[in-house]
Image (tube, grey):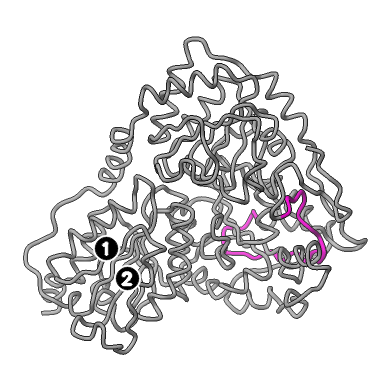
Amino acid sequence: MIAQRLANNGARRVLDTLVAEGVDVAFGYPGGAIMPLYDALYGHDLRHILVRHEQAAVFAAGAYARSTGRVGVCMATSGPGATNLVTGLLDAMMDSVPVVAITGQVKTHLMGTDGFQEADVAAVTQAITKYNLVVRDVSEIEPTIHKAFTLARGPRPGPVLVDIPRDILEAKISGTPAPQDGPTIANAVRESFRQRFPAQAEEIARAVEMIRAAKKPLAIVGGGCRAADAFAEYRAFCALLGLPHAATINGLGAPTPGDPHFLGMLGMHGWKAANRAVMEADCILALGMRFDDRVTGRVDRFAKQAQIIHVDIDRSEFHKIIPAQATIHADLRSALDALTAALAPNPPRFDAWAKSAASHGGPLPRDRAKPGMMSATDVLDHFFATAPPATYVATDVGQHQMWAAQRSRPLDPHHFITSAGLGTMGFGLPAAIGTQIANPEATVVAICGDGGFQMTLHELATLRRYSLPVKILIIDNRNLGMVRQWQQLFFDARYSATNLSDNPDFCALAHAYGVHAESIDRLNDLQPALERFFATNEATLLHCACYPEENVWPMIPAGAAIDEGIESLAGESLEV
């Protein structure tokens, strides 16, 4: 009787449709309105990862998507369960990450009555998802979920929410789901973007004319490279021209590892060489990036000597912040293939300019810790020197995020997972969980600050339950470091609500969850600790007690131009 009921209700149809779309795992937390779906999960082939807070479910789903290019899926019940997804949905929206969220809802006859745990989640998430859909009839479940996946995948990826009332999940439904081949669908959809959004010949011709006329062109690659899975084409294009290039934080990993023409991350905490090249360039190729304010600084001073070629699959990004002299509305792989083909017969070479631009790099400026104290930048320098090349790094948000982004040289854009556009504290650990689930044989590290880690540390229980070998590196400076830095620089050192000197014993917390942990506070102990850290095949936490007043340099102050950076407390100019 139970098997017959489950085989013919809306909840089972949801799960079967997810599997048909190629979903192998969903992250979630049960509750009243979504209980029929969890009942159907019992014995179903779809794997479910129980997190300890719904926010962790959506962060994990987003990281699953970021690290694979596939759609991440999360589930939550109505009311507080659904609203706990909001921050993660906005995070996915800001960084163009494909996520489908399935939420339970009160029964249809209770909708609009302020029933127990009712929230109009479709209205709540209207501005922070690509689309949201409310299922009103059990027959709508299958087509609605397929539509959600189609929308989430693109052309510009993003989150989609599907809200399903409890009585719809319980309702009988006849027939069987239409047969699908999820991986084939995903590959076909991705390939269809190349067909649906090809680079137009006249747009390519205009861009080629500008590139050939340039003396100092610069490419800037953004998160669109990961979304389009275009990093192979990007690398080939840069190599063809000997082109200097820089990346936004979401574009990290797109350049060939070790490419001497790569100038690093640009923007507020970017490398001097990258920021200086922006100001010297006479032509900028903006490839799948949106000219975020953390990249441009003062817009009226950004790249004033340069003509702009902007390539994006989302036409709404053109001229939104920085006017472009040429636009290519196309799938990024299609555009790069077309540009490469057009330039290949007689490619201009910019090696001399690239070498000159790279010469302005030099070591990153940094603060030094007081004698006897450990520097966070030393910790991260040693970390990246020790980590295996294919390590996946998921960061939390704050100073450690910027230090990590400055130093990370990931194999490809899927290997550096961070909350870029929204800057969400608490992201790191659940993101590492989603990345590890997606890449079970890989080395996955969450780099967290002491503040952000405490927002989602309960997910240590998830590590333990599923025996996930996630490694956690905590940079503990006993402060909300980035806010403290801004208070020091711009608020006359009036430190308000940033001191975390009463932090808990992080190792004791880890041990309470059954996770191995070690704490160090001296540089001499760091390298042996890192070697032990990477040698283990189980979850482990390395707590690094660091100098509390170290700042992230260089820094472009808010409202300043990209050539007005400072690299010390004395306000020493970068002399861009």
Residue occupying the far front of the picture: 300
Q: Main secondary structure of the magenta part?
A: loop
For image coordinates 72% across by 28% down, the residue present is: 357
Q: Nearer the viewer, residue 117 or 200?
A: 200
Report the residue marked by disc 1.
45
Three-letter code, disc 1: Asp
Residue occupying the far right of the picture: 371
Q: Is residue 2 magenta?
A: no
Q: Which residues are magenta?
A: 534-557
Q: Earlier in the sequence, mark 1 or mark 2?
A: 1
Three-letter code, disc 2: Ala
Could you say where residue 98 lies in the image, as x and y percent from the top left?
39, 54
Mark 2 surroundings within 10 Å by alpha-carbon count, few (fewer than 14), some (14 through 19), many (20 or more): some
Could you say where residue 319 lies in the image, as x and y percent from the top left?
49, 41
Does residue 66 show up? yes
Label placed on residue 122: 2
